[in-house]
């Protein structure tokens, strides 16, 4: 009797392990653990509280934007590439407005989110009403937003920002003091990133809007026949990536405490690569907020590790290119297998 119970328990555990290993997030978590172990062996300073808290804080902006990019990628199978331009415009506008009129950090976040939503909605409206591919529309709006920023500001740097951004960016939880007297700890920016991930998870898994995003991404024609509100869902997805881009802009401003008009632009590939590394399909209909967060975390670890090991930063760019290439190839292969399986079933029938 006991032997039978042990056999059943073993079979249950094995089944659970097989189920876990089917998820991309599991393999990504394993890769993160292995990478952390390898870097720590080479440089023990990597896995210290101060260093981990530091690279989590510096990756908060890309982590927040990745959640929004994920939802658009699930919806359309094509990435929104205008989100960095949206964040850049919002960052500049918020910095100028708060210097001029003051305010508080909550008002700044609300204004940034509202600006981001409006610019994101422009993308969603064009994609829906004119049936233009997402990447084409967002390349166009990227150039419009970023170009107008330079036309209006002439590329002027802002070296002085409102003190509230310094206070927001320097807020620490579980703080400690280093040997040289500097404070370090878990940044509030990291918690904002975590909040964005949890919000993305809740929307995708627990709301009708989230299910609509997956349905449209999986089969747009079938979703429309089922009565899913296509316009509302598209406007939500693009508005949401705009909202998170606005929040990410305030987070970035609070970290760097200055505005360089092209400092955020150029991060598109890094964010998109993290999202596809996390399991999002470039054909739409697939992806998780946890996977996107793990993808960002892996790139943060890799970037920090290369720095600590004195390895050229160009290898980081190579890694991003390889990840995008492998992810697209894998998605195309999986889609081809599914089509062949459907054809085989029809022939057998």
Image: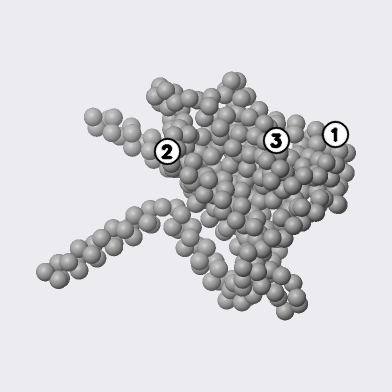
Figure quadrant of residue 212: top left
Q: Within 10 angstroms of label 3, few (less than 14), some, or many (20 or more) residues?
A: many
Residue 286 % position (x, y):
46, 41
Q: Nearer the viewer, mark 1 or mark 2?
A: 1
The residue at the point 33 percent across, 37 percent down is: 341
Q: Closer to the camera, 281 or 101?
A: 101
At mark 2, the secondary structure is helix
Residue 98 % position (x, y):
80, 44
Q: Earlier in the sequence, mark 1 or mark 2?
A: 1
Q: Which residue is mark 3?
A: 115
Q: Closer to the camera, 223 or 242?
A: 242
Residue 138 % position (x, y):
66, 33
The residue at the point 76 percent across, 77 percent down is: 180
Q: Nearer the viewer, mark 3 or mark 2?
A: 3
At mark 1, the secondary structure is helix
Question: Marks 1 and 2, how far apart in space?
Answer: 46 Å
Q: Which residue is mark 1?
A: 151
């Amino acid at each position: 009797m006991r032997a039978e119970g042990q056999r059943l328990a073993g079979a249950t555990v094995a089944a659970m392990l097989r189920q876990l290993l089917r998820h991309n997030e599991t393999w990504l978590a394993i890769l993160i653990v292995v990478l952390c172990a390898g870097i720590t062996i080479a440089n023990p300073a990597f896995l210290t509280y101060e260093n981990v808290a530091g690279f989590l804080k510096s990756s908060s902006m890309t982590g927040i934007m990745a959640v929004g990019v994920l939802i658009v990628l699930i919806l359309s199978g094509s990435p929104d590439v205008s989100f960095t331009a949206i964040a850049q415009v919002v960052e500049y506008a918020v910095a100028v407005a708060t210097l001029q009129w003051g305010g508080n950090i909550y008002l700044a976040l609300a204004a940034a989110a509202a600006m981001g939503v409006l610019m994101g909605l422009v993308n969603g409206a064009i994609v829906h009403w004119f049936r233009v591919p997402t990447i084409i529309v967002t390349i166009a709006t990227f150039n419009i937003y970023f170009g107008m920023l330079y036309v209006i500001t002439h590329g002027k740097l802002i070296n002085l920002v409102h003190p509230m951004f310094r206070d927001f960016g320097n807020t620490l939880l579980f703080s400690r003091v280093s040997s040289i007297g500097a404070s370090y700890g878990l940044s509030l920016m990291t918690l904002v990133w975590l909040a964005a991930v949890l919000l993305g998870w809740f929307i995708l898994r627990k709301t009708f809007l989230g299910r609509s995003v997956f349905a449209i991404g999986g089969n747009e024609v079938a979703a429309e026949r089922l009565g899913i509100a296509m316009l509302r869902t598209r406007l939500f997805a693009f508005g949401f990536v705009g909202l998170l881009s606005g929040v990410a802009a305030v987070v970035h401003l609070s970290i760097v405490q200055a505005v360089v008009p092209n400092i955020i632009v150029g991060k598109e590939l890094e964010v998109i690569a993290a999202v596809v590394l996390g399991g999002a399909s470039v054909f739409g209909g697939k992806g998780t907020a946890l996977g996107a967060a793990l993808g960002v975390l892996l790139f943060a670890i890799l970037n920090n590790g290369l720095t600590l090991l004195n390895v050229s930063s160009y290898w980081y760019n190579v890694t991003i290119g390889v990840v995008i290439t492998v992810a697209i190839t894998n998605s195309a292969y999986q889609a081809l297998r599914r089509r062949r399986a459907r054809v085989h079933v029809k022939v057998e029938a």
